[in-house]
Image (tube, rainbow, N blue to C red):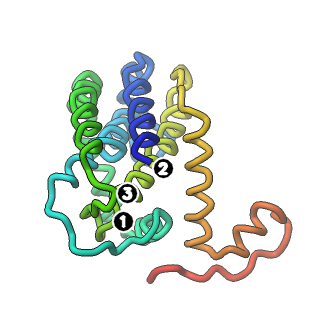
Amino acid sequence: MRDDFLRGARAVLTALSDPAVAAAWDRPSVLADQTVGSLAGHLARGGVWVVEDYLALDRPPAATFPSVAAYFAQVADLGPADHQGIRDRGAALARLGPDAVVGRLAERLPAVAARLAGEPADRLLPVSGGAMALDLYLGTRLVEQVVHLDDLARSVPDLVLDVPADLVATVAGLGTAIAVERHGPTAVLRHLFRPDAPAPAVVPVLG
């Protein structure tokens, strides 16, 4: 997962460095209330260097999220203020301009890679809402990278996006696990193979 995360991070840097992104920086993205620039800021921070920020914090005593799916089930239960905070952080970075965001990402990415190379396999990480194993958290960041790179490509039609197919496949698999966690296996099974069948009742996973 560490190698996958870093390959995804390099794909983020390549995409944000594309002149088409800078040209569209202040335009609306496909995400509500977010410009292309704020989406780019979220990709850089939330998709890459937040890992180094969390690694600088004290190690938690135990994990509270046992899987990528459990983490995203918690994210789905965030309130409007929490989601607005995420958008605001991306917007704050966007105001620095495309050159500054790309420059900061290019500067921090090697440090993130070097830090990951020295972390043990059992490293726990304090994260938003709890704690989890480092490599599981990197899986959540890979999801952020791949999904939001697709959002960026839909927002900037001239962007030439190059995301390794195996990373997209990995995220698709994680997405299925997240859907099972949130909606139950039968609902996901029917959605994939029998979309015309009546959906079973959705059982909340959290809350």
Q: Residue at x 22, y 54 (%)?
A: 54
Q: Is label 1 or label 2 in front?
A: 2
Q: Quadrant of residue 100?
A: top left
Q: Is residue 44 visible?
A: yes
Could you tell me which secondary element the residue under label 2 belongs to? helix
Q: Which amino acid type corresponds to the residue marked 2 in the rendered image?
A: Val
Question: Is residue 7 or residue 154 the one in the foreground?
Answer: 7
Q: How far apart are the alpha carbons under marks 3 and 1?
A: 23 Å
Return the mark for residue 143. Answer: 2
- Taking the spot 28% from the left edge, 60% from the top edge, the residue there is 123
Q: Quadrant of the C terminus?
A: bottom left
Q: Is residue 11 above or below residue 200?
A: above
Q: Quadrant of residue 197?
A: bottom right
Q: Earlier in the sequence, mark 3 or mark 2?
A: 3
Work out whether residue 148 or residue 125 is closer to the camera in this orientation and state it: 125
Q: Earlier in the sequence, mark 3 or mark 1?
A: 1
Residue at label 3? 137
The CA distance from mark 1 to mark 2 is 21 Å
Discs 1, 2 touching: Cβ within 8 Å: no
Closer mark to the observer between disc 3 and disc 2 = 3
Q: Secondary structure at mark 1?
A: helix
- Label 3 CA crowd tier, 10 Å (few <14, some 14–19, many 20+): many
Where is residue 196, by image quadrant? bottom right
Q: Which mark is residue 80?
A: 1
Percent coordinates x, y for residue 58 in the rendering:
14, 63
The three-letter code of the residue at mark 3 reads Tyr
CB within 8 Å, label 3 to label 1:
no
Amino acid tagged 1: Pro
Question: How many numbered discs?
Answer: 3
